[in-house]
Image (spheres, grey):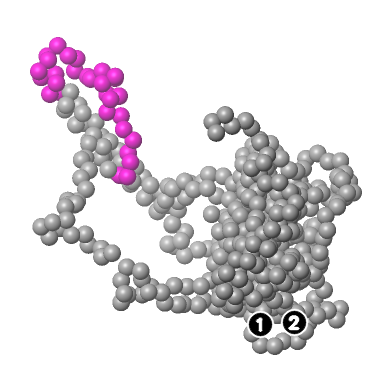
Amino acid sequence: MSRIRIGRKLPGYKFPLHYTGAPQRRIFIPEWYVTLVKPRKEMPKNYVRFHVPADMTKYDMKEYLDKVYKIPVMSISLSIVNYIRYRQPTPWRKDQYMWKFLEPWKIAHVYLGNNETFEFPEILTKIKDEDDEEMEGMDSKTMVEQQEAYSKFAEKQQTTGTSIKDKTYFENKWL
Amino acid sequence: MAVAKCCRCMLRISTEFISKPSLTSRSFITERNLIPLLTQPPKQIHTSNLRYGLEEFFDDPNNFGIREIKSGSCWSRDLLRLKSTEDLHKLWFVLLKERNMLQTLELYCKNEDEPMPGPDRLEKVAESMSNLRDVFDERESAKNMLLTGSTNKTPGEWRKSGLGITYWYEHKEHLLPPHLGKKKGDQHAEIAMFDRRLEEWHLRMEEKRAKKRGSYYYRIGLKWGRIRANNPNLPEKPPKWWMKKFKTTWKYGIHPEKPVLLPHHDDRFYWGNRPNKRY
């Protein structure tokens, strides 16, 4: 049961009591998972937004970014997203619906230091290569043209190298 | 590149050059008792390429736009047990960064309403992280067993509460030990009499149990009387081996000879006996 950690509900970490002269408190395995998020509106260039578990404070976030990612940070402010209740229709009956909850999380507004800037990259667009030029515009072509282009592409692939059928890993007496 | 990248964090780990751990470093407080008992020799030099900054929240740029990304299998516990604790500690952070990267990708794809490339990577990373935690727990409990004699992370003991229930009490931190603790001054009469009332309650419960026990053995004696009536050669007192047959533990406050019957429940579905729940 100590594995389950719901922010603000179940306790996360237990540390021994601090006394004067004690060494620094450390976490051996941080179980905080942080996601970078693209804001919908345009924000200044040194602004980064994270979705952060509800246990964390801004000092925890600062340490996390400093030590795990080594990012220079100017300021952090957290804002919480409280419980979200939403309706889901039940699969066994059309009229009925169930109430469901989303656990709360925090949004971290981080401003980078050292005059650094950040732009959210386009993850789902391909970076153009030489091989891709031949396969461009395949959707607009007819089936015959597509087959011709593919056969050319396939021939290029098979100029060198032998196929697996040529090699014999073991004697096959049955065939 | 995708396979190499995933191989880098999934299947291979390289070690960093570190200086010899000093004697003082053994004494720092962590929430886990995992510092090795013996010092280890220094490791080999690090050779893989590191990338700093916010780029680590995203995949290799060569992987942008690819629909299906291959990935290796997750770290199994057998593989993890071969590594030292320092290597495992480093692996944890590698997996943490990978998990953050995959979560950003997942959220982005959700908002753009597109399929995430390689969703099984997240499951594999989560599984390998949980396996890592298992291995840490194993090592910690083994070390605690050697040092203290029990596998508990925090010290504790079995205690009996005022109402007679035994529970596991974890030692908590107090300013003063109990024999130098609070001195009880004048109290309200009901509070001051509470302990005595509790004792009285315990005595009454014990009387009740003894009465039940007495009635039980009385009825067993009657049984012996019935047997003796048919076989007059038997002794007056029943033998001990015969009495031991009726020895029971008192479970759930029920007399051992009381028959337990569940309420009548008909499983049949016809003639109006339908289940109460609607599915």
Q: Are marks 2 and 1 in contact (CB under 8 Å)?
A: yes
> Could you tell me residue A35's position as x and y percent?
66, 70
Left of A161 or right of it: where is B19? right
Q: In this figure, which residue is indicated by the disc labeled 2?
A: A47
Magenta region, residue range? B225-253
Whether residue B243 is in magenta: the answer is yes
Question: What's the chain of the residue with tag 2?
Answer: A
Q: Which numbered tag is attached to residue A39?
A: 1
Q: Secondary structure at mark 1?
A: loop
> Mostly what secondary structure, the magenta segment?
loop
Q: CA distance from mark 2 to mark 1?
A: 10 Å
Relative to B15, residue B187 above or below: below
Instruction: Using the image as rendered, state which of residue A86 and residue A40 is in the foreground.
Output: A40
Mark 2, residues whose alpha carbon is within 10 Å: few (<14), some, or many (≥20)? some
Horizontal side of B190 relative to B114 (left or right) equals left
Q: Position of residue A39 (x, y in %)?
A: 66, 82
Report if residue A86 is visible in the image.
Answer: yes
- Horizontal and vertical percent position of residue B156: 59, 46
